[in-house]
Image (spheres, rainbow, N blue to C red):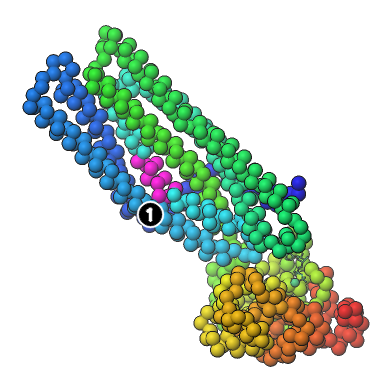
Amino acid sequence: MARNRYFEDEALTYEFSASSIKKALRYALPHRKTLITIIVLMLIFSFLALVPPVINRYIIDYVIRTKDGVWGFAAVQTLIMLLTAMGCIFAADIIFASFRTLFMAKVGHSIVHDIRRDAFVHLQKLGFDYYDSRPAGKILVRLTNYIDELAGVFSSVIVNLIVEGSKVILILVWLFVLEWRLALVVMIAVIPMSFLIAVLRKHLTRRFRLTRNKVSNRTAYIAESIQGAPITKAFNRAKLNTEIYGELCDKSNRAFIHAIRLNELFFPTLDGFFYLGLMMVYGAALFFSASAAGLSLTLGGIIAFISYMGMFSAPLNSITATLQQLTSATSNLERVFEVVETPPSVFDKPDAYPLPPIDGHIVYQNVTFAYEKGTPVLQDFNLDIPAGKMIALVGPTGGGKTTVVNLITRFYDPQAGRVLIDGHDVSGVSLFSLRGQIGVMMQDSFIFAGTILDNIRYARPDATEAECIAAAKSVFADAFIERLPNGYRTVTAEGGQGLSSGEKQLLSLARVVLVNPKILILDEATSSVDTATEELVKNALDVILKGRTSFVIAHRLSTIKKADCILFIKDKGIAEAGTHEALMAKKGLYYNLVTNE
Ligand SMILES: Nc1ncnc2c1ncn2[C@@H]1O[C@H](COP(=O)(O)OP(=O)(O)O)[C@@H](O)[C@H]1O
Ligand SMILES: [Mg+2]
């Protein structure tokens, strides 16, 4: 079976810890007033929940006296009073519970809303290296499924833990008050039960984390399959890919079943311990009542004691359930925070200043850059481009042309050396001011879902329709746009399905031109455009490039011929530089490239 990186689990080194919960609690901080109100109210109600057994006990011991009971008005009156009190407690509990659910849902969702926003904001700050190093699908899963699941957790977990925890303590205290010797017997069952729960929980954490990993692998593979659908079809990979997907599904299912199987042990274990406790308490009650000291509890007292024991296992159940929820939530949180906490490789320095309006004089000073440590793509690279010049970059594929231009926009930062624009080190200015003055058209031009107009004004949402049309005309994109069913208002799908590569490139070119930047980077901007259109665009470029410093990476000789300087990029640096005429006369690498075309 073909294996690929979707079979690799994400390695997150840190164990389940309070730290991700702590970070999540930071998000709860703004809601502390609501949370505290709910918790206080819930504590009052959990205290009130302890009252009904006391009323029961009173009714049994004093109202319905089994032997010498007397039917009388007083007894009926007391009974009605006590039952009314009990009814009120139940009613208040029901009303409060529905309010609590509502408020907790609100708080939960608003916490998750904040996490979701922060994660998205951060995702946009992360450098290209982050996206290079993992499948888009895995990032997607984190920001959608994982965060969605958190909403449920935040609506209940925080409050549940506090309230149920205090309930357990209250009941325990109450048991000791009722009959301390029997309470000690109960503890004999509770202590080993707690240990067992702790052990089970540890294993569950591990199994749930594994499940998340497998689910994430599976989803990421779906994401890739959608993006690669045409290639999949073209290369008859459907059957093989289905097998790969099947295996990923099996893995996630197996991991889930593995986790659930352990999960199912929880409740039987708790019930088992409850019956064990019950047996021990009855045994002890018998023993004490026969002993000299006797049993201080009345019949009603014993019934109350047993019902407290029953109430004791409910919050314990709920705590373990909550802890499980929390456990699987922490493995979600871990992944979400891993995104939020990955430091962006390219960022504004604390003392970053806005780049003032530029002329476009670009200097590379001893620049060394590597995508992966140890294998530099550029080594000690030097270049000085006066403002307004057109530079063409040529050379073998993988030679480093794209890399050279990526350093101007700071898509990556060099490991050594500097890139200067008008004397400003680009690493010292704010990214926003830098990128705002550079027009980039990358190798693959992405088309967003929207209309043709939306796509042209992507970088300048305030641009008027007339400006957009002018931009499209200037790069000869209007010819094909006019032919579309709705012209400029034709709706484009994400990725530009329905447009040819050449059309997508023309559209992206219009997008760049609309920005009217001082520095223009065209990375194989017209490589997919047909020859006739290319001829037109070539003339347009003369106009577009005027008054701007430009980097043009192109295969076609006609485009690069007019450059003020042609650089042949190879072996980590500039192998040849000069005008077309000079390089042709030199009869070197460039000459070979041109004559072999
Ligand atoms: N994101 C990346 N991560 C790792 N290596 C990369 C990345 N982008 C490019 N490279 C490598 O850097 C070298 C130069 O690539 P590039 O600048 O894209 O070349 P060109 O644009 O001249 O075809 C190539 O060997 C390529 O494999
Ligand atoms: Mg390239």
Image: 173 above or below 237: above
Residue 571, how many percent across, how many down? 83, 69
Q: Residue furthest front?
A: 485
At a point 53% along the width and 52% down the height, the residue shown is 146
Quarter of the view holding residue 292: top left
Residue 505, how many percent across, how many down? 69, 78
Q: For this rendering, which residue is in front, 559 or 418?
A: 559
The prevailing secondary structure element of the residues shown in magenta is: helix
Image: 22 above or below 470: above
Q: Quadrant of ligand 1?
A: bottom right
Q: Residue furthest left?
A: 73
| Disc 1 element | helix
At a point 24% along the width and 22% down the height, the residue shown is 301
Callout 1 crowding tier (Cα within 10 Å): few <14, some 14–19, many ≥20: many
Q: Hey, what amino acid is under mark 1?
A: Val
- The answer to whether residue 473 is magenta is no
Q: For this rendering, which residue is in front, 328 or 500?
A: 500
Mark 1, residue position: 107
Residue 234, how many percent across, how many down? 76, 62
Asked if one can make out residue 267 in the rendered structure from this viewpoint, the answer is: yes
- The answer to whether residue 157 is magenta is yes
Image: 488 above or below 339: below
Residue 315, how many percent across, how many down? 37, 35
Is residue 477 shown left or right of residue 56? right
Asked if one can make out residue 38 in the rendered structure from this viewpoint, the answer is: no
Q: Which residues are magenta?
A: 153-163
Q: Residue furthest right?
A: 587
At a point 13% along the width and 18% down the height, the residue shown is 69
Quadrant in which the C terminus appears: bottom right
Is residue 428 shown left or right of residue 528? left
